[in-house]
Amino acid sequence: MSALRSHLWHASGGLVYHWRALRYRRRLWQPFAAQVARWLADWQPAQEELVIVGPSAGYTLDAGFLARFARVTILEPDPIARSLLRRRFAGIHFEKGRVDCFSGMDGPRALSQAYPRAAILFANSIGQQLERLDPGWPAALQAALQGHSWASYHDVTATAQAPRQNAAAQCFASGASLEEVLAGFWPGGELVLHDHGSFGVLPAQAYAIWSITPQQHHLVEWSSITVVGPSSIMPGNSGISGRS
Ligand SMILES: C[S@@+](CC[C@H](N)C(=O)[O-])C[C@H]1O[C@@H](n2cnc3c(N)ncnc32)[C@H](O)[C@@H]1O
């Protein structure tokens, strides 16, 4: 098993991320955090144990969601994030886990074997990792997590171009292209973007915008699977009221 090593610098985390959170979390990040809270409220795994992959300091997590679980394990390499997370959610006991599920093709199986009874939440951690992982990793993840409830919100694209104002989360017909999804959030015209390669690689239910800074806007995808019994799996819903 590949062990998770602590580090302070990561393209998607670390000190720069905490500085941005300090600056933008209360206002600019608030609509996205509220949308994540709605997605998480609709995701109702039967498991009492939760593993969070990449929680950082939980800037997009809420105490009500965390309190639903009797045991919460975090897989987070950033020691500052772990310490801030414990301070921000003082009522939750977080256990530090040691599996690096992004270490390679064996990572998903190691994750499932280490936490066989847990629901697993990827907290905006998959998008940044996919670019350097084997293209077969998402399929390996879904195979390894059969029997688990799991959910992920992950970056799909990033761009400096501002989306429509107050663009609410949306769901799209299955088979919708990335261009169709982007057109739902950005006005027409050419869009210069960074593509994480994560579009549609997991079963997607909905999309939302996360403006990380006033100049950087991410399209985020929500995927969830809920296992309600030994042989009963429910794809998640969109977490958008009035839509399925
Ligand atoms: C974009 S941030 C997550 C945002 C966070 N969920 C929030 O609510 O603010 C991505 C996180 O993934 C973490 N990360 C990086 N490599 C990881 C790994 N191998 N396993 C788990 N988490 C990892 C980073 O340290 C960072 O905290």
Image: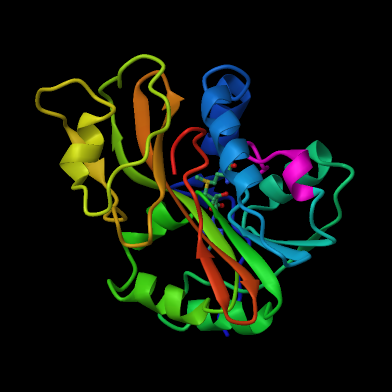
Coordinates of residue 132 in the picture (x, y in percent): 32, 64
Q: Which residue is drawn at 79% across and 37% down?
A: 88
Q: Is residue 139 visible?
A: yes
Residue pictured at 44% horizontal, 37% vertical: 243
Task: Name, please, the residue furthest toward the left.
Answer: 190
Name the image colouring: rainbow
Residue 179: image quadrant is top left
Residue at point 19%, 38% (across, down): 180
Q: In this view, does 48 lie above or below 61?
A: below
Residue 25 placement, left or right of 86:
left
Is 167 part of what is drawn in magenta?
no
Residue 199, x across and y down, in percent: 29, 53
Q: Within the image, what quadrant is residue 117 found in?
A: bottom right
Q: Is the magenta stretch mostly helix, strand or loop?
A: loop
Q: Is residue 104 in view from this perspective?
A: no
Q: Is residue 180 above or below residue 228?
A: above
Quarter of the figure that contains the N terminus:
bottom right
The stretch of residues the image draws in magenta is 57-66
* Label total for image: 0
Residue 178: where, in percent of width, then height? 21, 45
